[in-house]
Amino acid sequence: MSTLIIYATKYGCTEKCAKMLSEKLQGKVELWNLKENKTIDFTQYDKIILGGSIHMGKIQKEVTELCSKNLNQLKDKKLGLFICCMREGDTAETELNSSFPQKLLDHAVATGCFGGEFIFKKMNFIDKMIIKKVANTNKDTSAISEESIYRFGQSMNNA
Ligand SMILES: Cc1cc2nc3c(=O)[nH]c(=O)nc-3n(C[C@H](O)[C@H](O)[C@H](O)COP(=O)(O)O)c2cc1C
């Protein structure tokens, strides 16, 4: 059993969560940064996990493109889909559901919202201004949900 975790990240949070998740999975696990390399050979993996982060309500376009170009291949795998985001509850669920095609969401054996982080020193000027205004904070905040990552890992291992 081998698993590929494909992720896109802007400031490193999704990469951090992908690594945390990799430690919870059984068998061989590889990580793939989608922003560094978009051409993926899925054939050698039984399980694919795909994740990205939400910025201004949207997941990275690399994630959306990967889904639309490889819909059938992804539907042949045991699939997990996750997002990193700072919204919680129903809003986070809505963000998750609008990030991936319905066919993949229906097919997925695990879906999850892993929470997120605001690390101001990593952000560009505009993002800092947006977060200060929208989230009304200028303090670093970490709200990664280890429990969600654990539960997602369990679902993948049981699939
Ligand atoms: C400019 C900006 C816009 C964001 N917009 C949203 C948003 O619309 N919804 C949300 O839930 N989180 C939003 N976030 C929070 C990010 O999803 C969170 O910081 C996440 O940890 C980023 O992960 P990354 O470092 O892997 O890109 C935003 C963050 C930034 C910096």
Image (spheres, rainbow, N blue to C red):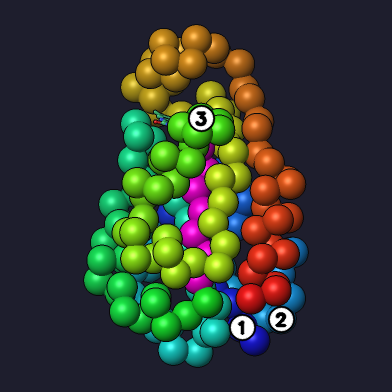
Rendering quarter of residue 88: top right
Q: Is residue 106 visible?
A: yes
Q: Is residue 9 visible?
A: no
The amino acid beneath tag 3 is Arg
Vertical relation: 117 (above or below) 131: below
Main secondary structure of the magenta stretch: strand
Q: Please tell me which residue is depicted at 52% across the width and 84% down the height of the picture.
A: 45
Query: Residue 154: x, y in percent?
Result: 72, 64
Q: CA distance from mark 2 to mark 1?
A: 6 Å
Q: Which residue type does callout 2 highlight?
A: Gly
Observer-nearest residue: 83 or 61?
A: 83
Query: Which quadrant of the structure image shows residue 131?
Result: top left
Q: Is residue 40 left or right of residue 5?
A: left
Residue segment shown in magenta: 79-85
Q: Which mark is residue 87?
A: 3
Does the CB distance between marks 2 and 1 fall below 8 Å?
Answer: yes
Residue assigned mark 2: 27
Most distant residue in the front direction: 106
N-term-proximal mark, 3 vs 2: 2
Q: Which mark is residue 132?
A: none
Q: Earlier in the sequence, mark 3 or mark 1?
A: 1
Q: Quadrant of the C terminus?
A: bottom right
Q: Quadrant of the N terminus?
A: bottom right
Report x, y in % for residue 31.
Answer: 56, 68
Q: Which mark is first along the chain, 1 or 2? A: 1
Magenta stretch contains residue 83? yes
**Foreground tag (3 vs 2):** 3
Identify the residue at horizontal 42%, vertical 39% (top origin).
Answer: 94
Q: Residues within 10 Å of mark 3 (few under 14, many from 20)?
A: some
